[in-house]
């Protein structure tokens, strides 16, 4: 893995997480498992959290509220079989189960081989950042089959820009979110590509001088083909 400061990159791709690399939710081993004792209560609590409490969620993504505090706000009663921090720990552990847009991985790997840095740039929570850092710093598996798509993509990242550590959202100030990393690596926006599902983020990135490709993981096959062609064109790979 490239270490910050040891490599002189000629380009950089900033990749969003939710909507680009994955669509899966937190606590997916519970939410996607109807047999789990907490399935009904947690699914409803999470639905209300993300559907009715946008300010709380945004503060969580800014790092102003911890995952532990969010879990407390869900008011899920745990049976004695579960440790008190069960849902807090599950929020980290379940990230490894998130399914990844597998078509992007070889494209990003090919870009990296040409001297392009690959950075995750995401509005996301402390639990997600902890899961990412654990995956990036853990020892590689002996056999490829021992890893998960989540760990594979995490080890690909040369660096991570996450709103919960930066303390503001990418969507609040897209230019500010990226410019410090670029300047500290002697790169300009003209050297950068953003893959993001939000039109606003793409528009602001382009206004700053970068290239942006809007992507949503639920695009039809024909639109997905166009997306991959645009990405290959920017990378100048066949």
Image (tube, grey):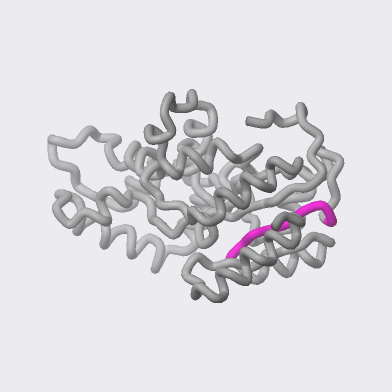
The residue nearer to you, when weighing 231 against 54, is 231
196 in magenta? yes
Q: Residue at x 21, y 54 (%)?
A: 33
Residue 113 visible in rendering = yes
Q: Residue at x 48, y 36 (%)?
A: 130
Is residue 126 positioned above or below 55 on the image? above
Q: Residue at x 72, y 64 (%)?
A: 212
Instruction: Indicate the quadrant containing the C terminus: top left, top right, bottom left or bottom right.
Output: bottom right
Instruction: Indicate the quadrant containing the N terminus: top left, top right, bottom left or bottom right.
Output: top right
Q: Position of residue 179 (x, y in %)?
A: 79, 49
| Dominant secondary structure, magenta | strand
188 in magenta? no
Is residue 212 positioned above or below 105 on the image? below
Q: Which residues are magenta?
A: 190-197
Is residue 217 positioned above or below 177 on the image? below
The residue nearer to you, when weighing 142 against 135, is 142
The residue nearer to you, when weighing 43 against 212, is 212
Q: From the viewer's perspective, is 33 left or right of 176?
A: left
Residue 173 visible in rendering = no
Q: From the viewer's perspective, is 22 left or right of 5?
A: left
Q: Residue farthest to the front?
A: 238
The residue nearer to you, when weighing 181 against 151, is 151
Q: Residue at x 48, y 31 (%)?
A: 134
Q: Position of residue 204 (x, y in %)?
A: 75, 66
Is residue 143 positioned above or below 117 on the image? above
Q: Position of residue 178 (x, y in %)?
A: 74, 50
């Amino acid at each position: 893995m490239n270490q910050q400061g040891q490599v002189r990159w000629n380009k950089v791709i900033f990749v969003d997480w939710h909507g680009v690399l994955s669509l899966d939710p937190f606590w997916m081993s519970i939410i996607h498992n109807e047999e789990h004792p907490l399935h009904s209560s947690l699914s409803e609590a999470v639905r209300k959290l993300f559907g009715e409490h946008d300010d709380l969620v945004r503060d969580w993504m800014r790092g102003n509220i911890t995952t532990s505090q969010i879990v407390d706000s869900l008011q899920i009663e745990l049976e004695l079989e579960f440790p008190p921090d069960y849902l807090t720990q599950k929020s980290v552990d379940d990230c490894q189960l998130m399914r990844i847009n597998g078509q992007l991985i070889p494209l990003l790997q090919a870009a990296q081989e040409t001297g392009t840095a690959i950075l995750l740039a995401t509005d996301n929570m402390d639990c997600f950042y902890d899961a990412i850092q654990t995956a990036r710093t853990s020892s590689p598996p002996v056999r490829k089959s021992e890893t998960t798509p989540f760990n594979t993509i995490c080890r690909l990242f040369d660096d991570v820009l996450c709103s919960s550590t930066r303390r503001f959202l990418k969507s609040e100030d897209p230019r500010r979110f990226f410019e410090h990393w670029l300047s500290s690596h002697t790169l300009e926006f003209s050297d950068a590509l953003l893959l993001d599902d939000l039109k606003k983020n793409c528009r602001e990135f382009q206004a700053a001088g970068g290239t942006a490709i809007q992507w949503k993981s639920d695009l039809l096959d024909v639109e997905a083909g166009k997306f991959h062609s645009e990405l290959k064109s920017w990378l100048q790979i066949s």
